[in-house]
Image (spheres, grey):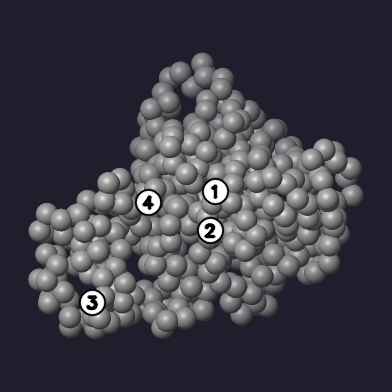
Amino acid sequence: MKGLFVKYWQKVFFLTLSAFILFSNVSAQGGDFVSNQVIVQLTNSTDLSAVAAQYGLNPAPLGQVANPPVYLLQITNGQTPAQVVAAMANDARIIYREANRKLSQAERTGLNWTQGRSWSIGRSWSIGGSVKGYNGQWFPDTIRLEQAYAAGGTKGKRVDNNQPIVVAVLDTGIDLNHPAFEGKLVPQADMWDFVDNDNDPSEVGVLHQNPSFGHGTHVSGIVSLTAPDVKIMPLRILDQNGEGELWRITAALIWAANHNADVVNLSVGYPQQVRLLKDLLDCVDVGTTPTGTTFPEIGTRRLAVSVASGNGGNTIRVYPAAEVADGMLSVAAINRYDRLASFSSYERGWVDVTAPGEDIISTIPGGRYGMWSGTSMAAPIVAGITALTKARYPTTFATPHDLLDHVAHTSVDMRYNASPWGEVRLHRVDALCAVTSNLDCPIPTTPVTNAGFENFQIK
């Protein structure tokens, strides 16, 4: 086990960490990229040597995916990725070019796309908790999980062959020995650590020193609580500081497809669009992008992807949630009163659905439990409901887009106006309506506070 579990676990009562791992922009000044790498898609692979020579690149790719080919290339002339990308503008041989973004946590202050706070965005989470608290918390009743299990006849195993749906969690790894995951993980041969390049995706880190420590374990526990019979595929794409890179996420999505995942949870983000990941998210839906790019590496396997919208507490777009790709749903967070959580990034047009994301109890390293808040907690609930729906209707939906559309269309549609988001259309997911194909999902019958629900409407 690669985690460094410190002796003072029991002495810690409250720990402020960030619930949603966001990523920073590439700029010549910021240095938020792998310093000597660039990603390039060429119209024709025969142009690789000439393009490499012209722009000071090693013609031997560090990696290659897709068709037309996308290359990860090493810069050899001392220029920055931003300089190389700028120099490639208007080169007809190049379809697109971008830096291999070095992903970093958004706990840093001064960024305009995140609140810049630590875990939970204004909410501490307590170390301790219990399995009783985990199983008895508020959100399962809100999304009507028990009723969904009874009506759908499954908790995550396909009704046609009794095989479990597989949910890949791309994150900081997992506590492989946590009791909550006993019998619920894929074989270790199907796991991978894309940071250390081995098949042990255990969490790595030290409390207080590594603020991302435990994020992947917590996210995985939410998936498992929502859909208890699914198999979790932990894929470690973020290091002990919550940092990764674009190429690593791409490799992990391809791995998930090739190792029989059905659903992917992606609680990560960054403030600008990235073409490579947008194309791959399109391809895991129907196999090709609108511009004709394919990824032969994923074959015929298709993935339904749930992506957290971000913790900005505003309408600033966070990617990949804002990519509007057919194979994904972007997920904002609500509180227990069926209102958008104050920390949630949200805007009509790119946020698809909402799910509980405030004060969520789940697993943390060391076999323990903790309470966190963030859109990172909402996305795995949607991933779990998507898995339940796939299990109930294993052959009904032709594409992941159709499956995810069903989850969105069976959500509870509540509307109200609130600052800073404007009109909020919650589209809060509902497990019972999803597994019973109720396209007119009723509003909640449990009374909630009216505070703050100005101009509240039900559709």
For label 4, the crowd category at 10 Å Cα-Cα, with few meaning under 14, some 14 to 19 and many 20 or more, is: some
Residues tagged 4 and 1 counted as in contact (Cβ below 8 A): no
Q: Look at mark 1 in the image and give the residue it sits on.
A: 310
Q: Position of residue 29 (x, y in %)?
A: 27, 46
Secondary structure under tag 1 reads loop
Q: Nearer the viewer, residue 237 or 388?
A: 237
Q: Which mark is residue 91?
A: 3
Q: Earlier in the sequence, mark 3 or mark 1?
A: 3
Looking at the rendered image, the disc whose residue lies closer to the viewer, 3 or 1, is 3
Q: Which circle, 4 or 1, is nearer the viewer?
A: 4
The type of residue carrying mark 3 is: Asp
Quadrant for the N terminus, please: top left
Residue type at numbered disc 2: Ala
Q: Is 448 rendered above or below residue 250? A: above
Give the mark nearer the N terminus: 2 vs 1. Answer: 1
N-terminal of the pair, mark 4 or mark 1, is 4
Tag on residue 321? 2
Mark 4 → mark 3, Cα distance in angstroms = 24 Å
> Position of 355 compared to 105: left or right?
right
The residue beneath circle 4 is 25
Q: Residue 25, how many percent across, how many down?
A: 37, 51
2 or 3: mark nearer the eye: 3
Which amino acid, by three-letter code, is at mark 1? Gly
Answer left or right for 255 relative to 144: left
Q: CA distance from mark 4 to mark 1?
A: 15 Å
Q: Marks 2 and 4: which is nearer the front?
A: 4
